[in-house]
Image: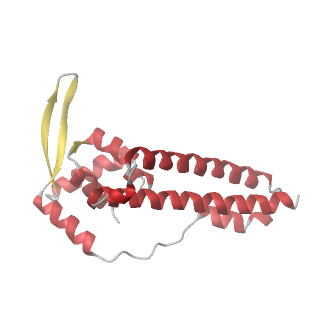
Amino acid sequence: MALEHALLVSLAERAGAGMELTRRFDASIGFFWQATHQQIYKVLARMQERDWLSSQVVAQADGPDTKVYVVTPAGHAELRRWLAEPTAPLAARSDLAVRLRGASYAADRTAILDDVRRLIADHLARRELYQQLCARDYPEPAELTGQDLDHYLVLRGGLRLEQFWIDWLTEYLTAHTAKE
């Protein structure tokens, strides 16, 4: 997936200005597809050159004018084309897995175990955030359809991934601390 497609999804959901889009991106798609603000602005310009987006300058009373981006018919066609493509299998590429595999070569495993503890805390915090979002935004998941159901199921996937990381890292930590 290219950043272009992630932005097309976000803008298809709701038109927006660049800064607003980067904030929305960070609060939703950014949980599983990272991009810097500079990358987003660069890609928005490229998408506009391809006629996937149009923009309108909107005056703001409390600040400088802003560009609001809207997906064009060509952009919707590209999004439909991309959505129809089969998804490639996820490539497993994990710096963490390589570190843990090679941990026995470290002079002292303490730094690695400290890093594992930090990662567990990060994943616990992210899982908590996802649980809060589920409870706040989707209190009746059985009633969901369409876009809301899609968003909920992606959030549930995020919860399951966070639980996987918590379980695996806890298993690693427990196995090594029990032997010390």
- Along the horizontal axis of the image, is 89 left or right of 44? right
- Along the horizontal axis of the image, is 20 left or right of 177? left
Is residue 83 placed above or below 70 in the rendered structure? below
Classify the position of the C terminus by image quarter.
Answer: bottom right
Splitting the image into 4 quarters, where does residue 175 fall?
bottom right
> Of all residues shown, which one is farthest toward the right?
180
Q: Residue at x 38, y 50 (%)?
A: 138
Identify which residue, 67 or 152, lies in the foreground.
152
| Residue 96 x, y percent position in the rendering | 63, 61
| Residue 10 x, y percent position in the rendering | 28, 52
Q: Residue at x 64, y 47 (%)?
A: 121
Q: Residue at x 32, y 77 (%)?
A: 86
Splitting the image into 4 quarters, where does residue 61 fall?
top left
Q: Residue at x 11, y 60 (%)?
A: 73
> Of all residues shown, which one is farthest toward the top?
62
Identify which residue, 141 or 75, lies in the foreground.
141
Splitting the image into 4 quarters, where does residue 103 fall?
bottom right
- Along the horizontal axis of the image, is 159 left or right of 105? left
Is residue 135 placed above or below 105 in the rendered structure? above
| Residue 29 x, y percent position in the rendering | 37, 53
Is residue 171 placed above or below 28 in the rendered structure? below
| Residue 39 x, y percent position in the rendering | 35, 50
Classify the position of the N terminus by image quarter.
Answer: bottom left
Identify which residue, 93 or 146, lies in the foreground.
146
